[in-house]
Image (cartoon, rainbow, N blue to C red):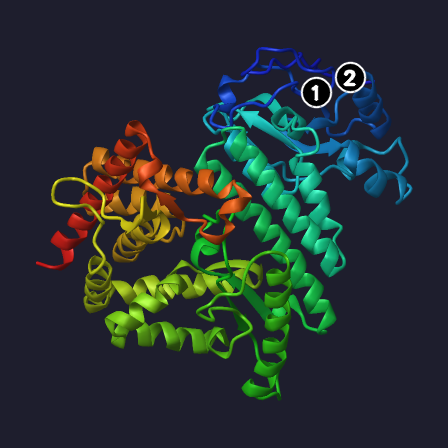
Amino acid sequence: MAKPLVPQPLVNPVSGGRASSDGSALGTPHLDWRLGDLPRRNPVVLPADAPLRDALQTMSARRVGSVLLLDARGGLAGILTRGDVLERIVLPGVGLQEPSARVMSQPVHTLCADDTLHDAVLLMARERIRHVPVLDGQGQLINIVSERDLFALQRHTLQHVGHAIDRAATLAEFEQAAAAIRDYARHLQRQGVRARVLTGLIASLNDRLTQRLVAWQLQAHALSAEAMCWVALGSEGRGEQTLATDQDNALIFAVESGQSVEAQRARWLAFGRAVNEALDACGYPLCKGGIMAGQPECCLTLDEWRARFAAWIEGGTPRQLLQAAVFFDLRAIAGRADWVQTLRAEVLQRVRRTPRFLRLMAQAHLEHPVPLLWHGGIRTRREGPHRWFDLKLHGTGLIVEAARILALAHGVAATETRQRLLQGGAVAGAPEAEVQDWVAAFDHLQALRLAHQVDPKEDTAPNRIDVATLDAVAAQSLKAALHAVRTLQQRLALDYLR
């Protein structure tokens, strides 16, 4: 039997406590920790040609949930987990004398030492895995992080929520899964998880729920995923959903040979409405502006979408461009992702050839300046003793719009606001310190929104805060964030209003 490397007990980086024998942490790590800063343990490894019996006995003896399998050169060839035993070994009747390589999962999804626990959480959620090997700068294996290392959160675990999503087969079960996502997000927010981490995780889980709903309704309507693409727009397209979010989505569909476009559109509209209504039942309200896949204006063929973007870019009025802005955050959720990649590339090329479009977008954006008074105070809406401020309308929304313009102007394909600011600001030649201020302002305002939304009583006004209730430090931090937004708008004004 091949001799494995022995894993060392993992120490919780927050509490300093020892982990259990299977490597599960007894507390909750902070998600901004670098993976390279975690206490090292030797991952259990075997040659890929080791018999399955050896691999299973090793996992049992070491009380671990996975074994990494190496090729002849010592590189990662695959991974075998306890979850693989039933579906890949027992049910197919694979003999235990067979090499582990026959049933291992590959390729292995890895992260680097400079990545964070946040990155590990998102990777696990996106790829539906529970173990992530960690590599150093030379690509050598130095550690392995498991889901249990990250989330010892009683019933609030990523696994618990993921299972609720994956096993949902009725509308009631989808509603329960969506509620589990919100409960989980509120739990993490109370644990102090940062806004960037939390919004990314919420978006990832919402994507997963939407993918399951889409597949459920495709089957109900006898339609094929190969003939469509479900597209996220707005905050979902940017991967920045908070606890209070409505729907912004669209549909691209193909026309079968011998069928008319309108006949096909009717089928896809029925499908789109069914998904929209299911999402609404799950707590994602219908878009008041009608930007949903079940509406004729948002259910188009790829050529129709090309024509629509061309019309916006080459002849849209400022008002039309403001209304169409969320469509430029498009991201594929289910189906033919290559259609969205093609469409996004064509849009960026067309924008670069049309300076008028960027100028009009900037003008429309700058008609809504940051609500700061000349003496540095914040313009609010007064109602008796209250001084109301909308964190989305007058805060994050302004940053999102400005970042979108930066990205389109400089050919940045990213849809996430932070990446648009970082990449677009760099290409635009903005000082790094100024760009970092923009990013910090966005993170701070998002954190305020999430902190406000964690209270279920705030469902009726999820983005509105009473500035009169802020202490001096909180009020000053809000002002500083808005001043950073003002510098972003000033840069756009210099570039497009001269």
- Horizontal side of 151 relative to 232 (left or right) equals right
- Horizontal side of 418 relative to 331 (left or right) equals left
Residue 74 showing in the rendered view: no
CA neighbours of label 1 inside 10 A, class few (<14), some (14 to 19), many (20+): many
The type of residue carrying mark 1 is: Val
Which residue is situated farthest in the front direction here?
A: 384
- Horizontal side of 397 relative to 123 (left or right) equals left
Which residue, given by chain and number where applicable, does mark 1 sit on? 44
Q: Which of 384 and 33 is in front in this view?
A: 384
The type of residue carrying mark 2 is: Arg
Q: Is mark 2 on a helix, strand or loop?
A: helix
- Dot 2 or dot 1: first in sequence order is 1
Q: Which of marks 2 and 1 is in front?
A: 2
Question: Quadrant of residue 219 in the image?
Answer: bottom right
Residue 242 showing in the rendered view: yes
Q: Is residue 427 above or below residue 333?
A: above
Q: Nearer the viewer, residue 137 or 248?
A: 248
Q: Is residue 397 above or below residue 45?
A: below
Marks 2 and 1 close (CB-CB < 8 Å):
yes
Which residue, given by chain and number where applicable, does mark 2 sit on? 62
The residue shown at (24%, 37%) is 479
Residue 487 lies, in percent from the top left, at 18, 43
CA neighbours of label 2 inside 10 A, class few (<14), some (14 to 19), many (20+): some
Question: Quadrant of residue 362 in the image?
Answer: bottom left
